[in-house]
Every structure is written in C-alpha cells, then in structure tokens.
Image: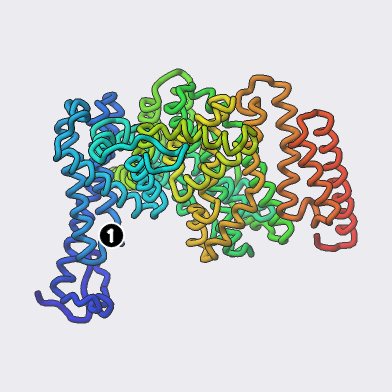
Amino acid sequence: MGCNHNMLVTKKDQRVDLEDIQKLDYDDEKVIIMLIIKKYINHFVVILSIIAMLFHLWRAQVGVLDALLQRPIHLMFMLLICFLGDEKYLNNWRKILIYISLAIISIITCMNMILHYDVMTLLSSAPRPVDILFGILLIIAVLEACRRAFGWALPIIAILFLIYALLGPYFPSPFDHRGYSMVRLISFNYLSTLGLWSIPLSVAANIIILFIFLGAILEVSSGSQLLIKFAMALVGSKNGGPAKVAIVSSTLMGTITGNSAANVAMTGSFTIPLMKEMGFSPELAGAIEAVASTCGQIIPPIMGAAAFIMVTMTGIPYTKIMIAAIIPSLFYITVLYSSVHFSCTRARIMGLPKKDLPDIWDSFKKITYLLLPIILLVYLLVKGRSIIFSIYYTCIFMVIVTFFRKSTRMNLKKLLKALEMGARKTANLSAACACAGIIVGVVGLTGLGLRFSEIIITFSGGNLLFALFLTMTTSLILGMGLPTSACYIMLAVIATPLLIKLGISVLPAHFFVFYFGCLSAITPPIAIAAYTGAAISGGNQFKTGLIAMKISLGIYIVPYLFVTNQTLILWDNYLELIFSVIFIFFALISISSITQNFLLVKNQKIDTILLFITIVLILIQKNYLTSLIGIVIFMIVFIFQYKIKKLRLRKNQIV
C-alpha cells in the first residue's frame, strides 16, 4: 500500500503520528488494516445497538417472551456491544483478536440457548457435555465483560462465590455445605433461570434498558441542558451557586438515569468546571457532584428505576414504594443541601451574578413539557398498568413531547442516536447484572442467604443496632464499584432476609440495603461516583471520596432511622410521622453543622458540644420531651450565632 511513512489518515480524516505506533513494531500496512477493521467494527456496533434497542421496544410492546429465549437474546446483544463497542480497548492486534473471540463465544453460547430454549430446563438434570462447555465459556465472557466495565470487584466476588459452591465441605462452620460438582454448578447457572439468567438479568432486559433509553432521549434532544438551565435560574445566585446547581440538576437527571457515575459524567462536565471557577477546590467540586448525582436515585417517583425493581423483588405495589421513598429522600436532600450551604458560606463562595443567569419562569416553562412523560408514567402505574407497559409508552410519549419545542425536536438522526445510546449504556449494566445473577444463583443453591442471617445474628448477639451495622458494612463492601441496580438486587437476595428475620418489615428492610447500595458509590476505597468526579475535576481520587463521605455523613444515619422508626417508611401513624420528621430534621441540620463547622457563623467548641447534645437527645432517646429539649438547645445555638452575625454585620465585618 502506498502511504506516507510519517502520517496516516483515519476515518475522521484526522492525521495520526506514526512514531508511537511504530514502537509496537507494526508496519504501515498492518496499522492501516487495523484502523479499517476498527472502523467496520464501529459501524457494526452502531447497527447492532439500534437493532438491539428496537428488539427490546418490540418485546415491550408485544408482551412477555419465554425467559430462556428473551434473556439470552438480550445478553448476546449486550456482550457483543461490551466487547466491540469501546475502541479504546481495541488498540492493538492482540486485543482485537481477544475481544472478537469473546464476541464469537457470546454468539455461540447464547445462540445455543436461543435455538433450544424450550428443552434446556429439561436438560439441566442431565446436561450434555457441549452445554457444560458453553456454560463455562459464557461465564468467562460475562466475568470479562463485567471486569472491563466496572473493574475487578464484582468478578472477584462472583469467582469467590463459585469457589464456595465447589468447595463447600472444606469451609468452617457455619459456612460449610455439602458442595456441588462443576457439572451441577454450570448446569444450574446456564440451563435454568436460577443463576445466570435469573432476576438481575431479567430486570436489565425488561426495565433498566427502557429507562436508559428514556434518559438517552432526554440527552439527545438537549432536554438535559434545559434542566441544567432551570437549576441555574433556580439556585445559581445563592451562596455557592454552582454547587447548588449541581444538586438540583444532578438530582433531576439522576432520578432518570439510575447510575450515579454516569450521571456525574453527564452533568459534572458542566457543573464541576463552573464550581472550580467560583473557587471550589477540585476535590470539593468532584465530591459535591458525586453526592448530588447519587441523590437522584433515592428521589421518587422513579428513583433511577429502583422503585420498579423493588416492585419486582418485593411484590409490593408501586404506589406504596413511591410514598415510602418520600421521607428518606427529603432527609437526603436536607443533609446534602445544608452541608453544601454551610461549606460554601464558611468559605465565602458567593453565587453567580443574577444578570448572567436565565430567567427562572422562562426556564421553568421550557422544562414543563419534559415533565409530562413522568406524570404519564406515574399515572399509568397508579392505575395498575404493568411496569414494562408504562415505561414503554412513557418512552414513546417522551419522543412526542420533544416536538413541542424546536430546540429539542427529534429527527431521524437523533432518534437513531438515542436508540444506539440506549443499548450502549445498557450493555455494561447488563454484564454486571449477569455477573450478579451468578452470585444470586450460588446463594440460592448453597442456602447462603439463610446462613448469612444466622452468622450476622450470632456475631451481633441479637442486638439490632449491631446487626444493622454489620449489614451496612456488608452492603457497602458488596456494592463498591457496582451500578446501583445490580447492587440492590444482589443485596436484596443476600441481606434483606436477615433484616426481616430480625423483625423489620419488608419495605424498610429493602430500603435499608438499597440506601447503602447507593451510598457505596461515594464510600472509599472504591467510591466510583466520587472517582468519576475526581477524573473530571483533576483532584485526588481518594481525597475526593473522603470529602464526599464527610459531606454526606448525616445520610449514613438515615437508614437506621427508618428501620428503628418504621413509621417513616410505612406511614402507619401520621401524628408520630409528623413529629418524627420535624425532630430528625433538626438532628440532621446539626450533623451537617458539625461536619462543616458552621451554622450561621463558624462554630465555637461550645456550639459543637451543644449541637452534639441536640443530636443525642433527638436520635438516641425515643421520647418527645427529650427531643423537644434537643430542639430548644439547637435554637439557643442558632439565636446566639444570629446575634453574633448581626453584630459583625453592623461592624461591617465579613462573616
């Protein structure tokens, strides 16, 4: 091939310097061939993604397919996109061959299920050797896809669970079990709906992909930009304006996207640079965006699809789950907003000039029509329509409402982009859900769920708070590095039976593990949302994670509150609910004030001590009188600091 030995032309007509490529000992012809192959692989993935999304929309419209038909089709699409859809991994011949091989393995192993789905369950008791081989290969492919997407955490856990299933008799009591052969373990995972093809993958194929498509429509149509502009108009002029913009915009987007790290990448690309310009340190800017992006997954009515997954896991009606999420989400917002406000006011970080901000009413009018699909979704669910039916027609309606304004109007190109984006963004999550399915399968096969309950109860000595602490620790560890949906499903199988056994109602038990599954995204050492924020801000990753945890310290207490006071979730006593919310509000404000060392002015030691007493009186003592005393102490600190602030203002001193 004739070519310039110093430069090459890529598919985007961008010139690539060959000096670095030549270090790999490739000649020009091989480099050109590699670039051509990557070009056609990219075209293939684009077409495949669109077809995959259309298949899922069609399936949502026509109704339920057999589980062992639909889920292998879904996983085949998703694994192909995982292995071939990210060009940064196809940067040399060895990796290209490896990932093409894994893609071929994915096709063969999934097609085996698709072509024989009607007899596979019958074969699980007497599997063919070829089925065992295909099962092993598919599990390897799933582990690699998950590793590439989210790192080693979940694959290592899955591998340890597989080892546990194989070597059960060699584990000490109470972890021991009779053990299972390789053939039994693989057939259980590959030939039934109890392992690889279990609930996690079902949720990805039926619910998560449609919600991600909904978010993709919003992003492609520039609706997300309108939400950010509305947030700018609403809180941009307040103290620490950009940080509060991050809270509002990331919460609005996060409740739809359902992935804290992805939400940080989406909204953080705008809010983090803006925060840095206003004087925030890189670590603080990244931390605020990470905590704000995690918040959206707890906000009803959507909760980043968690509400609908919870319906699947518990069988509890959607309306009850939506109502149950209101108080915990208000507590989360209270801690986040107060911590950011105190931090920004103490650091004297002012808001953006009002003249540079959009008009609030004009911004609100521009986003009003984008809320219509959400209203439709809630209406359909409240009326008792199925989750899949409701999400499907919400997606259709979202496309329609984008035509209400020229700036968001969808054309064919944008629609195809949204279809592609929906499948691409689901691919990694589906790999994680399939990997979580392996864990769920082992838990069911070995009875580990019941053993886990016995172990925690034994270690805690039956003490509820200590048992909750151990469950929290388990949830944070298992959830590190995982997308929220996969994390919650796994925790719901492993941890909620323990909480229910301790006398906690089903809904508070599920909310407890779900809450900490969300918080794992901002908890070091693997704080995936915080580290994504650090990558954008240029700050230190671990320090960003620590600051995120400090900002949200009060949030870590909230799950204990609605487990020990289940009225906050169940709404079974309205008078107690009202008083509890008021008391806890003052306690959470006090926690934020202590962590940020500020209320109206910088806290003195006596202020911190009094605020700590307020927290103890409200949260530790289940008594209205002690809680009222705590509020009185808080008001004494507040009034004292107000007078100091007023005195300083009179003297023209800056607080």
Q: Residues within 10 Å of mark 1 (few under 14, many from 20)?
A: few
Quarter where residue 190 is shown: top left
Q: Is residue 537 above or below residue 118?
A: below
Residue 376 on image: x %, y %: 45, 27
639, 117: nearer the viewer: 117
Residue ID at (66%, 45%):
554
> Which residue is label 1 attached to?
87
- Asked if residue 54 can be seen in this view, the reply is no
- Asked if residue 114 can be seen in this view, the reply is yes
Residue type, mark 1 in image: Glu
In the rendered view of the protein, which quadrant contains the N terminus? bottom left
Does dot 1 land on a helix, a strand or a loop?
helix
Residue ID at (53%, 25%):
506
548, 473: nearer the viewer: 473
Residue 565 on image: x %, y %: 67, 29
7, 285: nearer the viewer: 285
Residue ID at (32%, 42%):
166
Residue ID at (57%, 35%):
458
Residue 102 on image: x %, y %: 21, 52
In the rendered view of the protein, which quadrant contains the C terminus? bottom right
The answer to whether residue 612 is left or right of residue 155 is: right
The answer to whether residue 454 is left or right of residue 15 is: right
The answer to whether residue 335 is left or right of residue 208 is: right
